[in-house]
Amino acid sequence: MEAVLLSTMGLVLISGLGFLFAKNTVRAVLWLVLAFVAVACVYFSFGSEFLGLIQVLVYVGAISILTLFALMLTEYKIPSVSNQLIEPIGLGLGIAALVAAVLCMSIATAFDAKHLDYESADLSVSQIGQVLLSEYVIPLEVLGILLTVALIAGVLIGAIGTRAQPWPSASGLNEEGIRKP
Amino acid sequence: MVDFSLAQKSFSCSFKTSHSSLWFSMLIFASLLICAFAGLFAIAVWMERKMLGRAQNRYGPNRVGPFGLLQPVADGLKMLTKEDIIPSRADRAVHFIAPIVAVVPVFLSFAVLPLARGFSAVDLDCGLLFFIAVGALREIGIFMAGYASRNKFSLLGALRGIAQMVSYEAPLILATLPVVMVTGTLNLQKIAEAQAHTNGGVLYKWFIFAPWGIVGFILLLTAAIAQANRSPFDLPEGESEIVAGHMVEYSGFKYALFFVGEYLSMFALSGLTVTLYLGSYNPPLAFLSLIPTAVWFLLKVVVLVWLFIWFRATFPRVRPDQLMSFAWKFLIPMNLLNLLGTGLWVWTSDLLGQGSFVRWTVTALVVIGCWIAISNLLFKPKNRWRRYKLAD
């Protein structure tokens, strides 16, 4: 079982690296999609099917598509990344090493045992639903309101500055039956 | 009644260690599924061409075999022997992978459908969620095809296709919710078992016979047609508008793979509709239970696919704005009101006898009343009665 877990985590790493070193932006987003799927595989190998499926549905099915639309529908020339090194490479590497050290130390001190003992979470979907609607109902409703507000805001932002025009009818006549250009 | 779980158990018991038997039985069942559904693809191609031909007052293919039955074979051979053309400035890796990403999720989604009593390749607790999540992966394949072809029109077709598929995911998921509410589980096997009881020994209790089931079935079918990019929602591949849309720069077998993905997603969504509303593998009447349940499932899926093809022959294509307003202004509110009706049904679920008849009619009135209210409120056609200005 550990082989599966390690290989899915390795897939996350590989797709992250592919995302960093991709030749253009759309390829980078496709590597990101692979990273999302790999994270879902990590969830599956821990036994939480529901979380993994929600990860696929939300991240791959919605967020990556949103990203692709944002790339394609805005006036953004997709640049090809040149192979030159960026100037402050020493500073970048130093900061990356510092962040990695902090992360590794915090993970290592979080668990007392050296060997990570995971069990498959025996959590059924109905239990998650029960908990969501009893203990965590307020966060659930607040999230719902948040998403609704985002949706309405998006529609409003798109609609400002346009005036709804009636679609021209096929017969060339308008509502009163009069031919208008 | 044929029970496949016995076959599965006996298969895995014939090996010494349980580990290898699991992998081996998975392999056998997966390859069986793949072969069976690829064979169904051939049947669907033949059925479509024959039916479209008859609807258009002509014979379909009738040269290649008796009644043109070998036409899919001829098509397959043609596609295999065609030259594989890739545009010179295309993104080669993405162009290559796109048909794979468009086909593989559909095969994955067959794994959770209960094909017979006790037989589905994988028995997941959240099978319905798996089906829908995996269906969402197909859209990435469509985008990859449209982008990698370096063709403005194919990109446009791909984006239109993705917009359509994303906006019809919400009605699809919402239309499956009444069934989840009534059965209380996402497990497709258990949903199929919940429809395995007869009403007084004669009629099986399919969910379509409930008032929320009729409406839910129609809504799910509509969303399924849109998700499979079938006419009247076939904007991504509208032949008269944007010739083959995202598939325009593909030739040979990769083009055939896109169609394999589309037809198989039609089968998969029909399978989902059959499982949720049409009683999965249960026969309609009790005395017909002699026929094995696998045959019933297949029969119902083929009937739904026949219905899809009939819709293709009958309805004209919708415009993109009609598509979007249909999804957001009719399907989603109607789905939510259907959930209201289902809530009423579940709330009064302890009524028996005379009370159950009242419950059926009251729920039916609520649900159909909502349908009439929504369709008349939101879709007032401007030129309902066409007025002509004639010369006097």
Image: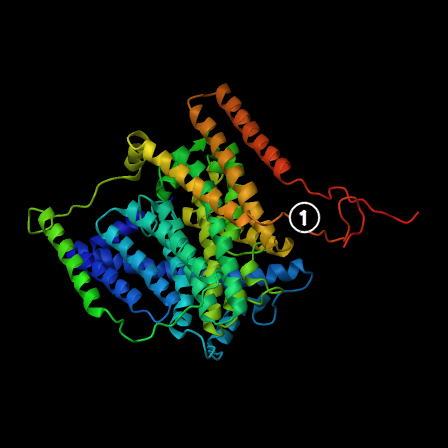
Identity of the residue drawn at 44% across and 70% down: B148
Query: How far across and down, in percent of the image, does residue B40 sit?
Result: 46, 60
Say which chain tag 1 marks. Answer: A
Q: Quadrant of the N terminus of chain B?
A: top left
The answer to which of B178 and B282 lies nearer the viewer is B178
Left or right, residue B30 beside residue A92: right
Label 1, on which residue?
A: A166
The spot of residue A58 in percent (x, y) is 37, 49
Across and down, in percent, residue A54 comes to 33, 47
Residue B265 appearing in the image: yes
Amino acid on which the number 1 mark rests in the picture? Pro
Q: Compared with residue B19, is residue A23 higher up or lower down, i.e. above or below?
A: below
Instruction: Kindly indicate the quadrant of the structure image that contains residue A42.
Output: bottom left
Depth order, front residue of B120/A164: A164
Residue in view at x 35 percent, y 46 percent = B127
User: Is B376 on the left or on the right of B217, as rendered?
Assistant: right
Question: Residue B288 placed where, x, y %?
Answer: 47, 41
In the image shown, does A125 or B380 lie closer to the viewer? B380
Res. B179 image quadrant: top left
